[in-house]
Amino acid sequence: MKSSQKKIVKLFATLLIISSFIAIYKGSYSISIIDLAFGNLEEIQEFVILNIRIPRVILAGFVGCSLALSGACLQGLFRNPLADPGLIGVSSGAALGAATSIVIGAEIAPNNYINSFFLPLSAILGSIFVIVILSIITKGFKKSNITYLILAGIAINSFAGVGIGILTYISDDAELRGLTFWSMGSFEGISWSLIIPSILLIFLTTIWTLTFSRRLDIIQLGENDAHRLGIDVKKLKKNIIISSAIIVGVSTSLVGMIGFVGLVIPHVARLLGGANHNYLLIASIFLGSSLMIFADLISRTIIQPAQLPVGLITSAIGAPFFLWLIYNMKRK
Amino acid sequence: MNKITALSFLILTTFFSKSTNAQANNYCKKCNNSTRIVSVGGSITEILYFLRLEKNIIGVDVTSNFPEEAKKISSVGYVRNISSEGILSLEPSIILGENDMGPIGTIKQLNESKVDFRLIEEVESTQGIIEKIQCIGNIMNHKEATEKILNEKIFEQAKELEDIKTKKTLADKKFMLVLSMQPSSIIVAGKNTSGDNFIKLMGGDNIFDSFEGWKSVSKETIIKENPDYVLLPSKNLHKNSKVEDFSNDEMFLNTTAGKKNNFIFEDGMSMLGFGPRTIYCALKIAKKINQEE
């Protein structure tokens, strides 16, 4: 990593720390900063901070990290600036799993407590199912051409669309609204018991993913050259897809569909610092986390005491950037 | 005269004697402090106003749009997408929620917080509405006044509705309730929807009770099922400007409802909200049909 890149990473890390502090301090329930600093809180304030805000901020950070990291890896792997976790169908697999649990979950797991775990679990199963299909279609990721993966992703996306469509059709009023809100993403109602297994999983997978950075650099030369340079391209492909599926599947399962973070954050990091992956992956993690924490902060304070779905905010920021990207690509 | 009043009171209370069930439910127990209420759900807010308890309401959700003044109270968002911190930030002494309040995580958090939080069951029938009113009255420690208001404003209407319902004229009639009508899709009330239950409240027959939920149906099916009456939320009328747009629709012209111009426009939440207004609304429509026939 160049020293200028180190500076940028430090800057993003500082941004993450600052945004976390602001997000824990700010919210619709007003708590004075002095009381917070000295732990001089009423019972209800303590409840809000410890059981509502902190788990929410932590999860937002991890989800931002997941989406940005997998976006950076997939863009590197596919050597395509438009790749994001949605491209290989993992998100829609998770969405289909979640939709199934929203619409027919109440009949299978009527208990509220089990039900809160049932949704993330079925979403993860959905994304695992997609990886299995991808693996079968590409014969264990042996097909060297990346186009196969993308085409398979497109097919899987539309297939999941059919499934979600059918579920939408058979769902009742309440379920339909549940589906709509889930598809816009939200960090509302997050509890410690729900996030601890997920953040552990995301943390470990993130560490594993960071070890791919050198190989991702080499693969930019093209798969054949990378192969000649001693890189096991098939294995790398498989590992990146599996790790992306885990972190995106877990994130999507808990908070719903949050668009554009996976696509936009790696581009910002690349524009500011460069494209070598040992820098890019870490920068994306910090920037993704802080953006997500910030977007969630906006979502829960902008129309307080009500809240906006966070997916709307990330997309509202991401969509204009995406357009700018397309505009610039055409100019080139 | 007093004897007659006492007697009719006795008859009416016996008639709705099942209503004491409301107090048996745990969530209907009297609360300790009802000075700061957050009401999440249109019918709950409507009932609080109905019981003249509105001065204690400090927060409502966006479905609480009746009466008009309720819209001025600060909003905690949409009933299915409530923010727990948002609600708690209003520092309520009690939170009343409709049973479709969500998401699940928020419900869990509110249960864990030490604020008094009640999810109120909904049974979409005359009896259900009365029990809900009694339940809320009971929670607010307002029991006697509630019975008095019910006695003045609901029991008689409910009894009248039950009477009309059993008459043959209504029981024979085929109804449909249209939620929205776009050129490409007509969405109607199927089985187990509030629309279906509203039709049942009047003793009518819903032609679309062969499927569950709100679904889109084809014009052909509507002609085949041949409704006698079409119920529409008046919101549709604003969008499409005139009743004639409906009555002149070729599809409807091929049905009894269209031929006789039997289109009934009512406020959507009056019909489907299952608050006190729903009883009045059902009674009004039932009376009208009964007179016409």
Image (spheres, coloured by chain):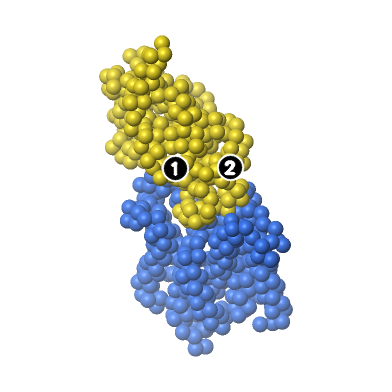
Chain colours: A blue, B yellow
Q: Quadrant of residue A69?
A: bottom right
The x, y position of residue B100, in whole percent, is 44, 45
Identity of the residue drawn at 66% across and 82% down:
A1
The x, y position of residue A277, in whole percent, is 59, 78
The circle drawn on residue B36 is 2
Pick the front one: B97 or B254: B97
Secondary-structure class at tag 1? loop
- Residue type at mark 1: give it: Lys
The x, y position of residue B88, in whole percent, is 58, 51
Q: Quadrant of residue B13?
A: top left
The x, y position of residue A99, in whole percent, is 41, 55
Secondary-structure class at tag 2? loop
Which corner quadrant holds the N terminus of chain B? Answer: top left
Outermost top residue: B1
Q: Does residue B46 appear to the left or right of B15 in the view shown?
A: right
Identity of the residue drawn at 61% across and 76% down:
A282
Q: Quadrant of residue A324?
A: bottom right
Would residue A45 be seen by someone viewing this image from the given angle? Answer: yes
The answer to which of marks 1 and 2 sits earlier in the sequence is 1
Q: Does residue B36 appear to the left or right of B287 in the view shown?
A: right
Label 1 vs label 2, nearer the camera: 1
Q: Which residue is mark 1?
A: B29
Identity of the residue drawn at 29% across and 19% down:
B167
- Residue type at mark 2: give it: Arg
How far apart marks 1 and 2 lie (CA) works out to: 17 Å
Identity of the residue drawn at 37% across and 34% down:
B20
Pick the front one: B84 or B218: B84
Pick the front one: A120 or B103: B103
